[in-house]
Every structure is written in structure tokens, then in C-alpha cells.
């Protein structure tokens, strides 16, 4: 232990994700127990860095939070120090470069390293701060599990579990009522949650952004089930699911229905179209933020803890400019620069896609 | 035990409700074990009675279903024998009186008594069949818990648990992001689910059909919390929540927003209006059918079992024309005729409403 | 509101019970929001009152704890001020009357009323403090649900849910392996948890303190199931289950088995005897403290909240010397003196016992 | 598709494990949907093969079982055809070689391939049947996750989740009562469940077979926490945890305590010793079969499904003599012979062990 205690700052940026507190706890316990260092919590993501809102987190603060959803540090979307909304004299809000404030606050707080837990946006900013000379360490956070640099991200297993449990519940209703039930789940660009959640929950049709679907194919599948004596179907659709050739799922429908009762999401659009085309009673459920909140699964707690411990070691003794990542069951360090913006989407011939097809699950692209 | 075995028919009508299978199991086990009688399952509610779709349910059929959501008998909305959709020669569908078919099938199946598990509609039909001389016994089913004749109905506790768990999940997100989150729950005419679920989940504002709300009151509450350092609020709104004097929640808004993205339910309307009026970021979650499906809670299993056993005793030895009900912790028999159509809504000064107000919970009617 | 703010003390005594924090929250929110009073938390039950360990609980302290198991105040078994262990000069511990300290600390803290949340022991002490002139209000807490003065106690539904979920899990194992599985649950003097949990989880045999069982009867039931093609049985046994005429379940067995591997509880004893007598492979699970911990069910949260709000009103404006209780779905005040020590055990002909018997469930007393 | 439909047999052997039904479903759906083959379910493991108890499983049989714990085929410990208990004339039971019956029944049933789902014992038998010329395909099943040939086995994540949830529950009790709570979990030879479950549930001390512990080290840890103001500790101990140098945990204690009430497992032994040595109140919970039963987690459903689909492909088109396995996130085929009996225990310097140590978790070997 060095003569002066190290001071490690930590912030959480971007959307909510189960496991954030498990990361904070792991970083805190490790820097305190292993390095005798001090943990400084920065509030509401980079907003707190720009505005100088920080507080020391002691042993008690990071205890008992392992199973807590959300983040005890808060988070914010107003987070980019280089494009920060500032209220000016006239009362209006201007976007300004406030990066100098972030740097100044970092130094005034006597921080040695900043641990930034967040998604792609957060990693970009961390990287830019690193370029300015700050010691930064990243912990990846994307509930969509779509980061190329890491095999899995925490929060994903919890989201998949929520989808799975919802499908279990809806299954009994669909089955008793002989209905089609459409469940809209997260996934604008990557279909991992729909794919894993749908397989775990036994969905009959899975629609994901990576595999464009046609109405004919979905309806054929649903009708085919009916002729086999299964008078219900569960359709799991990712937010970003799409028709081929750039046809927009929503626009096409808006022309047909303009009544006040229409629901606006893709789930509702899919439900309406299936009902119109097959005549089967159809219902829709939108899981929304239920997938992001609440206590993390055991799996996510272990993963978040491992990433946090690794980041803490890096924060206290280097290397810097890296992000903790899971590769082949091991936690490793990757360069933040290399990790940024490389999305990992579902390959159309991914093993789990093929497995689901073998079970008879439809992806809406079957001829 | 009589020389010839009694034959008891059972059907489930109306919407899905956790605990239906627990009732079927309890009726079946009791008529078989206690009376040596035979249980005949009628498929898809009264539809099966009109169309003669029935099957004997043995000991194995009613075993292992206690924790199963849905109904192994299926259910249907096409259920009223007096107004039954029949396909006629031209291929068109006509509404006909098919009650004679129901009676004929009841007799041809050699049934002694019909146990009808269902809501108000189901009880009406059971009562009319009773007037025609059939021995009928009812088991009340309404997930909304709004039947005056019984203190509690099964399925309600499960629905409340789902709402409560959802609020737990959303709480962490609301809290981390400093947001207002609106959760739409079941309850078109009675606010019991919103009231119990909202209290159990710690909602800050509860909007129920029985207590008209004003936008000013809601927004004042939300803002007041913000000034006390709580930068988030959870609003739990029943489907049937309404503004005073017959103002329609939805219509008022439709004039203002006509873009394709609007969501149509009351939850979305409330969320938009709060966001417009307070400037706080607001999100909406619609629980929908999640509240109706899945495994019943322990509480609902016990209640459903008690009602089922009671109904089985009535079915085998009378009295007939009665419905099993819970009154002051005891299961009793009430006349179906007396039980029909007496809704139990939330009194505005109900003890739990007053308790919630004491905690500081807003009902949208505070000045 | 009076010129000087009222100061309300609160403590939790005796064993852990889900819902304690929900009571603390409800008392706190009500005294602050409705009466502008101050809440003083007393640590570790009466121990904190004797030793003067108290702290003010603000709005933040009682927020966000609704779903938290345990008690933020701590509890203790070293709780009776009249028989309190005191370390004396020699280093030995003497039992002394420290009630004068409790009174002195109450007055020095400027408390107006003491809200005591606890079981029978806690109520006795509260009552004695009341006799000395303190304003006391009780909130009953017994996970066993065995208090005559109240229809239900919080924590009970959670314990029943844990038993029910465990039976669900064990059911699949029993069924796949054709085994007898014995589950030992709480209930030394009253069998409510075993009765409700066992019915909810579909146990085949229920052994409770109020209905003495014989080995013959249990084994006959288990064998009878095997002959009906059900090659497994679930036996739910309360800690206090007993043989007729004062025969001790455990002693009789200890003579037969003295090897080191024996498990000592009643569950294990029952399992061994069933295995010895029927030759069927038998396993035992002891739920123990799992039944007391963790997040309360929605039902228990509502009940605990209602009791807490009621107690807060009493604490701030009287009556004093009362305990909040649930009677016929309403929260009422009963005299603590009347509530003490009146156990409510399961009547042998209780409606739920009879219902379970109708289903074919054995209680070990069938001839 | 060939002229004659293939017939694929399937059996499940050994102990219960969440995900078995998900495997059966995946195998069934794939062989039917993809190959038009027939699935034959063999009852109670190899017992059913020896005794000729089999039945065709249709589409309906393998539907709706994805979330069901246990195995719809049953299982048995009486499974080795080469050492099979046979009742002989005298009524006594002899162990005989009945492998010829297994072969005969396989052929009489017209089976093309046997899919054997089970642990090491099951794989051994499958391998021997393969040596006799049968086409066999294995699916590994060990809840302990201790098979070297595969990165993860289904059921493990569910067991870890059960441990984690139990620790969450016990945490609140330990914390409120200032107690030490010892939780005994599965793991006779490998500590994976204790390690993952303990990290996920925030245990303070983890005792696993691979790292011998000393009483001094455990007690120091527990006392150290007390001096840091944390008056409780959670100790997670695997069944196979041991003292150094072959000292037996249980024997050492048996000499000291011979009273009838002693509990016999290692959890109880650890609890008693901690209480004796530290004077702190200590409780023990034994999770036992709760870890094996019930609905699989979403994670385990996906893994079981992937393994089942893979095994089905092998069963229908080869290769034979292989076992499906997960390696670096891909499902692959490994030779059964290579997979047998290579245990994967926890390396003492495993990354997760080191991570837990960094958090301050004790393994009972710290000086």
C-alpha cells in the first residue's frame, strides 16, 4: 500500500440495467479491501462529473446492494461533457463544451482513476477523457448484449428471464383462450433478447431485426399450428423487427387504421395484422421497462461482480484505457478504443437460430 | 353412496384467471374421493355444452394441475346458449337460441349437476339453466374482486402480486433515472387491483374508477415529491380511471396528439399529460394479460381449493342453485340469483384508501 | 397539530418476520405526513430502550424499505427490561430489573408514545410499560398466525408462500424419482403454516400439532397412493407434530438409531420411520429460517401497512394500551391485555382441515 | 426423409435436474419436425430399457413441458443393466447381468438410436451399449457442473439461483438478529454451486471441497466482521468441504456432542463449531433437494434446448457414440469415451475464487 491512499472515482451512465450495483459493490470492496483505496461515487453519470456532485462511498454504502436493481449513483442522459446543456443568462439552454469542468472536478477531487460503467456512449466519452490524459477504466453495460468485444453483458440474463417468465404467464392465457399473443421485447438493432427469451419461453414465432419477416410467413405458421390442433400461438417480436426491403412495419399500417384506439408500437402492429389476416383473436403485451429493472439474476450478479473486481484491479494498478470484458469464460482487458461501436448482431445462421428452426419455431422468413 | 354413481359436469367460462385449475382439481378430487362420483369436463365453457364436447376427467387428469395457470378445460367468449353464433346455410353466422342443445347434451351425458366456474355472465347462464330445472352450482371467478356476494375471489391475489412485482422492478428504474413511471393495471369498473397492488408496490399516485382525478392534483403530487428530493414517482392507474363530470381521459388527448406514435390506452394518456404538464421524463408500462396468467399464489390456491371442495359437496348432495362464496373467512353458499350483478366497487372512504392517504399517497382528487 | 411536535418511538422485538419494515415505513410516513410528528427508531428491540440506543428516522430512512425483509431497527432476544442480562464487576452476567432504565430513556428521549411491534413476549412487556404510565401501542407479529385477537398476522402469507414454492420444487423430484419427500415447516404449537402451505403445495399428508398422528395411518396413506399408481408422496410436517398420548416422536426413534449421521429434527424422524416401515426411498427437507426471511408477499405488505397506519394514528391521538388487529377484514384496536397469550390453534374440525380431508389428504389420524 | 421412419429412443438416468424435460422436448420436436422420425420414451432410465417399459411420445406429449421440473419419463437408481437387481425364486434379490434384455428390447422396439440423458453413470452404460453395436448419443446431466468435457451443464444455473435466493432470504434474518447463518449446499467433490451461489448471494465465507479450511480461519473472518460493525455473517458450505490433512469434519465433532438433537450434516457441524468458538448465535439451513427441483431458469432452458437439438441431429444422422457438449459458447460433439469420468473441480486459483478473495470473502484457508 502506498503512502497516500489512491482515490478511485466511479460513475454509471446510460439506461438502467440490473447488475449496476453489483459492479459498484465489487469495485468498492476490491479497492478498499485489496488496495486500501478510497471510492468516490460520482452522481448521475457524467452529469455529476461536470457539476462536481460526488461523495465518498464507504464500506457500508457498498454493502447489501448486490441484489438491488438500479444504481445507487443515479444515471442521466444529459451526459456528454462535450455537448452539455447549460442554462444561459436568457434562461435558454445552450449546448456547450464543458469538458474542462469534468477535468477540473476530476483533479480537484484528487481522483487517480475513473471507472466508467456504461454503454457505447459512455465508453466514447471515457475514451475521450483518456485521450486528455485521465486514467480511465471501462465496464461495459448493454442490456441488449450486442457488444462485439465481450461474449456477454450483465443485465442480459435478467432481461431474458423477465421475457421468459412473461411468456410462461401468457402461455396459459393463450392456451385457455385459443388466442395469438404477441409480446414485444427490447432489441432495436440486435435480436438477442428476443432470441434467447423466446427460446426459453417457447415462443412459436420469433421476429428479430436481423431476419426480415413477411406477413405471409408469420400467418402461415400460426395457421399451420391451428391445423395441428394447437389453437394458440406465442409471437415474440423485438422492437427493431422489420419487413424486407425497407418496408416500414408501422407506416404501412397507419394508412389502414387511424382510429384513436390504435397502439403505436411494433407489437401492436404485428398483432393487428395477424388478427386481420387470420381472423384469430390476438392480444399484445409490451414488456418495456420491466426488462430493465429489478433484482439481477444470480448469473448477472456473478458476471457483474467479476467485471467489477477486474476493473478495480485495473483502476488501482493499471492498465488504463481498457475495458473489462468476458471472452471464453475469462474476464480480460480490451482497449476501449477497440471495443467501441462494434455491434454484435445475431448472425442469420447462428447456432441458436438454427436450433430454434429445428424445433419448428418460425422466424417469419420461411417460404 | 347411491347404487349408481353420480355424474358431475364442470365448465369454466369467461376470461383467464389463476386458480381455475385448482378449482377443477378440488371439485374432481372431492367428487371422486368423497362421493365416488364421476367428473365430466365440458370444453370451452358453455360452447362445449351446446356442442356436446365433453370428456371424463379421471384422477390423473386432475392431479398435478394445482399450480398450473389457465384452465385445462379451455374457455370461450362464444358462450351464451341463448345467443349462440350458428353458421347457417349461406355461410353466414346467425345468433340463435341453442339452449335446447345445452339441455339435451346435459341429459344425454347423464349429468346430475353442472358446476359452472365463471364470472357474472357465466352465473347468469347457470341461473337460467337452473330455472329450466337443471341442478347447477356456481363458483365465482372475477380477477377484479368486484363481486358483492364474496369477500374475495381467487386470482385477485395473483394479479395484485404481479402488479406489486412490476412496481418493484420499475421502482429501481424510476429511481435511477429520476423519472415518472405510469403503470396501467386492470380494473374497468372497480379499482381493487390498483388499490391493493399500488399499496403493496408503494405507488405514489393511485388512480381508480371510483375516485375521479384531476390533472392538477396528480401533477402537484409529482412536483411536490420532486421538491422533497425524491426525483421520481410511480403512478398506478386502473383502466377505468376517469376525470370528473364525464370528461373523457382519452378524447381530450386525441385532439392534441395525432401522430402515429401515440399509444392508445389510459396509461399512455396519463403519461403524456404528466410529461406535458410537469416537463418530467415519463414512461408507461401496460401490464395487460400478465395479470391474468401464470401460476396462482399460495393464497389463491387455498381459496380456489376451498371454493372447489364446497361446490363439490353441493353438487353431490345439494343445495343447488347456489354459488360458493367467502364471507368472514368461511366458505358459505349463497343463492346464485342473489349473487348476480351486484358489483362491489371501492368505497371512496374505504379503510385502505384512507390508510394510503395517511401515507401520503395521492388519489388525484386532493385539492 | 400541536405547537410542539410529537415524538413517537418504535421498536421491533422477537424473531424475524417479513413485513416488519413495511410496518416501520407505514408508522413513519403516517406520523410524519399526517401529524408532522417525529419518529424515533429504537435499536434491537427493548435492548435499545434499556441501553438508550435510538436514532431519529427521517423520510429517507423509511422510504424504499417496503419490500425489504428483516427489520432496519434490528431485534434481539435479550429483551425483557425486568429480566435483563447485565455484566457485573466480576465479569459475570447477572439478570437484573432494568425497567427503570427503560423508563428513564423513554423520558430523556422525549417520547410521547412507544409503538412496539412484536409477538407475545413483546406485548407483555409493552403492557407492563403501559401499567407504569407509558403510552404504548402494539402491532402483533407472529409468523405462526396463532394470535386469537387477530384474524391474520403479516409474515404468515410469506411463510406459506415459501412452503408452497418448496413443495412445488420437491414435487417434481418426488415424482421423477418415485420417492416420499418429507418437508419440515414451522409451527411448534399451531399448525397454520403446515395446513395452508400444505394445501397450497398439494401435500398428500399433513401433520400438525393439533391432530396427533400414528405411524400406521401415515404409512397406509403412502402405500395406498402407490397402489393407485402414484409412486410418490409429499408429507408436510409441522415442528410440533406429535404422536397420541404423549409419545415422543423423537425419543422413540433415538433408541433405534444412534449412528452419527442421524438428523435430529422431527422431519428426519418422520422420514426415517416411513422409510423403515414402507421400504420406500424417503428424503427430508427442513425449511427453517427460509420461512422467516426475504421480501414480504404483496398480501403481507398490504396487511403490514394497514396495521402500521392504524398504530400510527393511535400513537398520535390515542387510544393507548391497544394493539392493532385484523377482524373481519377491518383493522381495529383491541386492548393489549385482552390480546396477550390467547393462542389460536387449528380446530380439529376447521373448515380447511375438512376441505383437505375431502380432497383425500391424510392427517395421520385416519383409521 | 427415408422410406421408413426412424425411431429414436430416449431415457433420463440418475438424479433429478431442472432442464430434463426441456431436453426431451427439444429432442422430440427436432426428430419429428426435422426428420419426420418417431420418438419413443423409455421409462425410469435404463430400468425401462431392461424391463421393456416404453411408449411413443407424440407432439402433444413433448409440448408444454419446457418449464416443467423433473422428467416426464421418470428416472431410477436401479439402472445398470450389467448389475441389475432381479427378484429370484426364493423372493430374494440377486444382482444379474441383464444387458441382453436391454439389447433385445431395443431391437424389438425397432429403435435406431438411443439418446441417453444423464450423468457419468449413465454415460458409462451408454458407452458399453455402444460397444455392443447400438447407436447411442449422450446428453450430459450433472447439476454440479463438474464435467470436464463441457463448459456448463443445464440445471447448474437453476441450482445456483436457488442458493442465491436462499442467501437473499437468510441475509435479512442474519442481519436483523446479528447472527451467523450457515447454508449447506450441494457439491460433494466440486464446489461450483457453492462458489457461484455464494458469490451471487454475497456469502462472507465459502467452504468448498477443493480448498481445505481451518476452524481458526473461519472464526477469525467472522469475528473480524463483527469488529467492523457487521454483526452477522453468511457462511456457504458445500457438502464436501473438508479440513486439511484428511481430518474429518464430522468425526471430530461427534466425540464432543452425542446428544440426540444433533444434526448430522456438515452444515450443522460447521454451525456448532462456529458457535462454540465465537460465542455468536449460529443457525443452519440445509437446502438439499430444493436445489434439484422446480422449473429451470431461462438460461438452463436455452442450454438444455440447444443440447437436445444437437443430440437429435446426431441421433438421426450421426455421428454416434458422441455426447453433446458446450465449448466456448458452441454446442459440439465429443466422444462419450473421452468425456467419461473426467471431473472438473474448482482450481484453487480459479479466476472467480480470486475475484471473491479480492472482495474480502473468506475461503477458510487464510492465515
Image: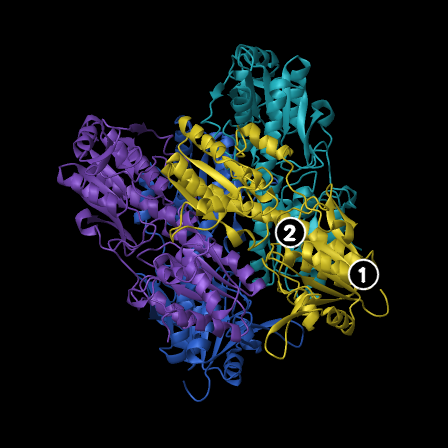
Chain colours: A cyan, B blue, C purple, D yellow
- Give the alpha-carbon distance from disc 1 to disc 2, as whole Å: 23 Å
What residue did someone put label 2 on?
A: D142
Quadrant location of residue B91?
bottom right
Which numbered disc, 1 or 2, marks the residue that appears first in the sequence? 1
Quadrant location of residue A251?
top right
The foreground one among D174 and B220 is D174
Residue at figure coordinates x 40%, y 64% from the top left = C206
Q: Is residue A345 above or below residue B96?
A: above
Q: Position of residue D144 (x, y in %)?
A: 62, 48
The foreground one among A247 and D2 is D2
Outermost residue to the right:
D3
Callout 1–callout 2 Cβ contact below 8 Å: no
Say whether residue B268 is visible: no
Question: Pointer 1: residues within 10 angstroms few (<14), some, or many (20+)?
Answer: few
Q: Is residue A232 above or below residue D147?
A: below
Q: Mark 1 or 2, which is nearer the eye?
A: 1
What residue did someone put label 1 on?
A: D131
Relative to residue B279, is residue B246 drawn left or right? left
The foreground one among A95 and D359 is D359
Outermost residue to the bottom:
B3
Q: Position of residue B42 (x, y in %)?
A: 53, 74
Q: Position of residue B246 (x, y in %)?
A: 41, 48
Image quarter hosting the C terminus of chain A: bottom right
Image quarter hosting the N terminus of chain A: top right
Quadrant location of residue B150?
bottom left
The foreground one among A144 and B96 is A144
Q: Chain of mark 1?
A: D
Label 2: element kind: loop
Label 1: element kind: helix
Outermost residue to the left:
C132
Q: Chain of mark 2?
A: D
Amino acid at each position: 500500500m502506498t503512502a497516500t491512499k489512491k482515490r478511485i472515482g466511479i460513475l454509471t451512465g446510460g439506461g438502467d440495467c440490473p447488475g449496476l450495483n453489483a459492479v459498484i459493490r465489487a469495485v468498492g470492496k476490491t479497492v478498499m479491501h485489496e488496495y486500501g483505496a478510497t471510492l468516490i461515487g460520482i452522481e448521475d453519470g457524467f452529469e455529476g462529473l461536470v457539476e462536481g456532485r460526488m461523495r465518498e462511498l464507504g464500506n457500508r454504502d457498498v454493502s447489501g446492494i448486490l441484489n438491488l436493481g438500479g444504481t445507487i449513483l443515479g444515471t442521466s442522459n444529459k451526459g456528454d461533457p462535450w455537448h452539455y446543456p447549460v442554462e444561459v443568462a436568457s434562461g435558454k439552454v445552450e449546448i456547450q463544451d464543458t469538458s474542462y469542468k469534468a477535468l477540473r472536478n476530476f483533479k480537484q477531487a484528487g481522483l487517480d482513476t475513473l471507472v466508467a460503467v456504461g454503454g457505447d456512449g459512455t465508453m466514447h466519452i471515457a475514451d475521450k477523457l483518456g485521450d486528455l490524459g485521465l486514467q480511465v477504466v471501462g465496464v461495459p453495460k448493454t442490456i441488449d448484449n450486442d457488444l462485439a468485444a465481450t461474449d456477454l453483458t450483465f443485465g442480459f440474463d435478467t432481461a431474458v428471464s423477465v421475457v421468459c417468465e412473461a411468456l410462461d404467464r401468457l402461455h396459459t392465457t393463450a392456451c385457455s383462450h385459443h388466442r395469438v399473443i404477441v409480446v414485444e421485447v427490447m432489441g432495436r438493432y440486435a435480436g438477442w433478447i428476443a432470441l434467447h427469451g423466446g427460446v426459453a419461453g417457447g415462443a412459436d414465432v420469433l421476429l428479430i431485426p436481423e431476419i426480415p419477416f413477411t406477413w405471409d410467413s408469420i400467418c402461415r405458421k400460426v395457421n399451420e399450428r391451428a391445423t395441428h390442433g394447437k389453437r394458440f400461438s406465442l409471437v415474440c417480436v423485438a422492437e427493431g423487427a422489420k419487413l424486407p426491403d425497407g418496408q416500414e412495419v408501422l407506416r404501412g399500417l397507419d394508412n389502414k387504421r387511424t382510429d384513436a384506439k390504435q397502439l403505436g408500437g411494433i407489437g401492436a402492429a404485428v398483432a393487428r395484422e395477424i388478427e386481420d389476416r387470420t381472423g384469430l383473436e390476438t392480444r399484445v403485451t409490451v414488456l418495456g421497462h420491466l426488462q430493465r429493472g429489478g433484482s439481477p439474476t444470480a448469473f448477472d450478479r456473478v458476471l457483474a461482480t467479476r467485471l467489477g473486481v477486474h476493473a478495480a484491479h485495473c483502476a488501482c494498478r493499471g492498465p488504463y484505457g481498457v475495458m473489462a470484458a468476458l471472452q471464453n469464460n475469462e474476464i480480460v482487458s480490451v482497449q476501449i478504443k477497440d471495443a467501441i461501436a462494434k455491434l454484435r448482431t445475431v448472425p442469420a445462421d447462428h447456432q441458436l437460430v438454427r436450433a430454434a428452426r429445428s424445433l419448428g419455431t418460425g422466424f417469419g422468413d420461411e417460404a
